[in-house]
């Protein structure tokens, strides 16, 4: 249950950090990339049962 909530929160953060939105256009791809890597790590941990 906790891993599902964490994945949903990370997906929302990833969508919000994309440089497509007006407030984040000056950020570049850094924040989106970092959140994307965290999302992949959490998904892998959830699938292996360690989360």
Image (cartoon, rainbow, N blue to C red):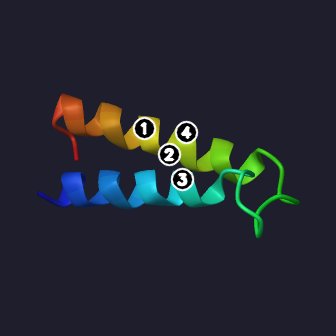
Q: CA distance from mark 3 to mark 2?
A: 13 Å
Q: Nearer the viewer, residue 48 or 37?
A: 37
Q: CA distance from mark 1 to mark 4?
A: 6 Å
Question: Which corner quadrant of the image does residue 12 belong to?
Answer: bottom left
* The N terminus - image quarter: bottom left
On the image, numbered disc 1 is attached to which residue? 41
Q: Are marks 3 and 1 in contact (CB under 8 Å)?
A: no
Mark 4 nearby-residue class (10 Å; few <14, some 14–19, many ≥20): some
Mark 3 nearby-residue class (10 Å; few <14, some 14–19, many ≥20): some
Question: Which corner quadrant of the image does residue 33 belong to?
Answer: top right
Provide residue 13's location: percent of width, then percent of height.
51, 60
Provide residue 7's location: percent of width, then percent of height.
32, 51
On the image, numbered disc 2 is attached to which residue? 38
Hey, which residue is sitting farthest right in the picture? 26
**Helix, strand or loop at disc 3?**
helix
Q: Which mark is residue 15?
A: 3
Q: Nearer the viewer, residue 47 or 15?
A: 15
**Helix, strand or loop at disc 2?**
helix
The residue that appears at 44% across and 35% down in the rendered structure is 40
Q: CA distance from mark 4 to mark 3?
A: 13 Å
Q: Which mark is residue 37?
A: 4
Of the image marks 3 and 2, the number of the one nearer the N terminus: 3
């Amino acid at each position: 249950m906790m891993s599902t909530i964490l994945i949903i929160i990370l997906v929302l953060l990833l969508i919000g950090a994309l440089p497509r939105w007006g407030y984040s256009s000056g950020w570049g791809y850094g924040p989106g990339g970092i959140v994307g890597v965290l999302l992949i790590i959490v998904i892998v941990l959830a699938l292996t049962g360690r989360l």
